[in-house]
């Protein structure tokens, strides 16, 4: 009897797993489609129908996964932060001291010339303005906050490594210092990515040189 029950349960579980996998795949496809349309038209001008067209799905399907457009806006922003988390995780889990990993993180954040990151930079900038100007808190903003908290956790993990290996100064608050440096450097990189090839915002100083100056300044202040 017990064997029969196991045999009966397994196909049902497999079917449920396949449905869950399909739902997750479709959810990802919708977020990718929304990213493309938002980048092209902006948050305010984009309609759910246009996102459905991009995803090659019915608009009712889009609303079934995301009842409001602002839900998709938050998901797109959270997805961008997730891509940054993956970059930091790769560096953090690699060999090396805290100081060496900070060097790699700064290098990884120099992405102003890559079209993919130019798009992401513009979307994050637009998202921050969208949130700041919203009269009411976004319903699912916690999804974005959770991703951002994961970033902060990685910085704390890196700071703890620095305190252990002695490769960075200990006469300062290591966590606050690393977070501040990464925020400044990351925001600068995003800004340069957004304004790349826009002559009106040309600083007349080579961008690679600007990044190197900022990187050298921060690393000099960190070194034990």
Image (cartoon, rainbow, N blue to C red):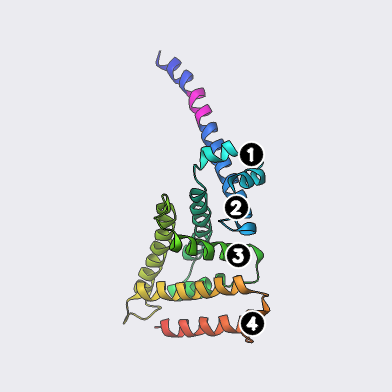
Could you tell me which secondary element the residue under label 2 belongs to? loop
Which residue is labeled 1 in the image? 57
User: Tag 3: Cα neighbours inside 10 Å, few (<14), some, or many (≥20)?
Assistant: some
User: Mark 1 and mark 4 in contact (Cβ < 8 Å)?
Assistant: no
Which residue is labeled 2 in the image? 46
145 in magenta: no
Q: Where 165 falls versus 129 (above or below)?
A: below
* In-image side of 177 versus 53 (left or right): left
User: Tag 2: Cα neighbours inside 10 Å, few (<14), some, or many (≥20)?
Assistant: some
- Tell me the number on the disc at residue 202: 4
Magenta extent: 10-16
11 in magenta: yes
- Tell me the number on the disc at residue 117: 3
**Of circles 3 and 2, which is in front?**
2
Q: Where residue 197 sits: x, y (%)? A: 68, 75
Q: Where 145 falls versus 211 (above or below)?
A: above
How far apart in space, not on screen, are marks 3 and 1 (Cα)? 27 Å
Could you tell me which secondary element the residue under label 1 belongs to? loop
């Amino acid at each position: 009897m017990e064997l029969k029950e196991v045999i009966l349960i397994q196909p049902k579980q497999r079917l449920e797993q396949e449905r869950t996998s399909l739902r997750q795949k479709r959810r990802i496809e919708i977020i990718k489609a929304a990213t493309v349309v938002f980048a092209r038209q902006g948050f305010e001008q984009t309609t759910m129908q246009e996102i459905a067209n991009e995803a090659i799905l019915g608009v009712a399907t889009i609303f079934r996964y995301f009842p409001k457009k602002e839900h998709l806006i938050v998901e797109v922003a959270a997805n961008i932060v997730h891509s940054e988390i993956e970059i930091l995780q790769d560096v953090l889990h690699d060999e090396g001291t805290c100081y060496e990993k900070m060097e790699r993180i700064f290098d990884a954040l120099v992405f102003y010339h890559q079209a993919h990151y130019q798009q992401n930079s513009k979307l994050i900038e637009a998202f921050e303005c969208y949130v700041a100007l919203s009269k009411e808190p976004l319903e699912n903003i916690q999804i974005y906050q959770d991703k951002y908290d994961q970033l902060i956790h990685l910085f704390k993990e890196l700071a703890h490594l620095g305190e252990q290996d002695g490769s960075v100064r200990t006469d300062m608050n290591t966590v606050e210092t690393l977070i501040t440096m990464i925020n400044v450097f990351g925001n600068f990189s995003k800004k340069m990515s957004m304004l790349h090839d826009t002559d009106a915002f040309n600083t007349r100083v080579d961008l690679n040189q600007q990044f190197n100056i900022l990187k050298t300044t921060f690393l000099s202040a960190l070194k034990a």
